[in-house]
Image (cartoon, rainbow, N blue to C red):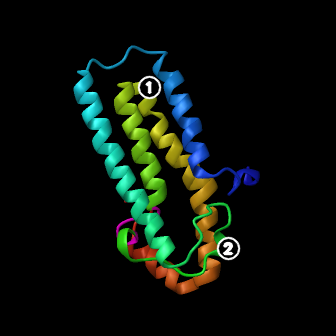
Amino acid sequence: MNSLELKVPPPIVALCFVLLMWLASKLMSPVEMPFGLRVGIASVLVATGLATGIAGVISFQRARNTINPTKPTTTSSLVSGGVYRFARNPMYLSLALHLLAWTAFLSSLLALLFVPLFMVYINRFQINPEERALLALFGGEYTAYQRTVRRWL
């Protein structure tokens, strides 16, 4: 299972989940909800996800850090300001919010089950290896950051 660690970029993983969610939504009748409400909820989630993800990328760019999720050992500094004061992984949180938006648009309870599965996958194969690398790079400073800021939110 370690062979999957840091191998598949999280946006690709999210796109795979989008497809799985769409397929799952075809297996069950959608939840009855007016189209406008579905679109409204999805739009709010997409906007929140975009703001969160963009804020994460900007914070990394300001710190001159790589945003390449497959190479956490090339991180040059620990980013703990901006959106990183609230979540250690705002870019992954952004992807999860986009998946929630997709669920709302599909109006599918079955598709909703894939959001926590995405988070489990990202925790296991992306975040855990990243955190090991950051701990090796930044030691106690990263441990202190972990104690004060939650992984997702």
Q: Amino acid at mark 2?
A: Thr
Which element is circle 1 on? helix
Q: Quadrant of residue 76?
A: bottom right
Seen in the image, is 47 located left or right of residue 120? left
**Mark 2 Cα-neighbour bin, 10 Å: few <14, some 14–19, many ≥20:** some
* Front of the two marks 1 and 2: 2
Q: Position of residue 10 (x, y in %)?
A: 58, 51
Which element is circle 2 on? helix
Q: Which residue is mark 2?
A: 73
- Say which residue appears at 61% left-offset and 66% top-offset: 130
Q: Amino acid at mark 1?
A: Leu
* Residue 152 seen anywhere in this rendered image of the structure: no
- Say which residue appears at 67% left-offset and 61% top-offset: 70
Seen in the image, is 3 located left or right of residue 142? right
Asked if the stretch drawn in magenta spans residue 96, the answer is no
Q: Quadrant of residue 104?
A: top left
Q: Earlier in the sequence, mark 1 or mark 2?
A: 2
Nearest to the observer: residue 40 or residue 21: 40
Q: Position of residue 148 (x, y in %)?
A: 38, 75
Decide whether the magenta segment is chiefly helix, strand or loop.
loop
The total number of labels drawn is 2
- Say which residue appears at 46% left-offset and 21% top-offset: 25
Q: Which residue is mark 1?
A: 110
- Give the residues drawn in magenta, as a range: 84-89
74 vs 4: above or below: below
Q: Position of residue 127 (x, y in %)?
A: 57, 60
57 vs 39: above or below: below
Q: CA distance from mark 1 to mark 2?
A: 37 Å
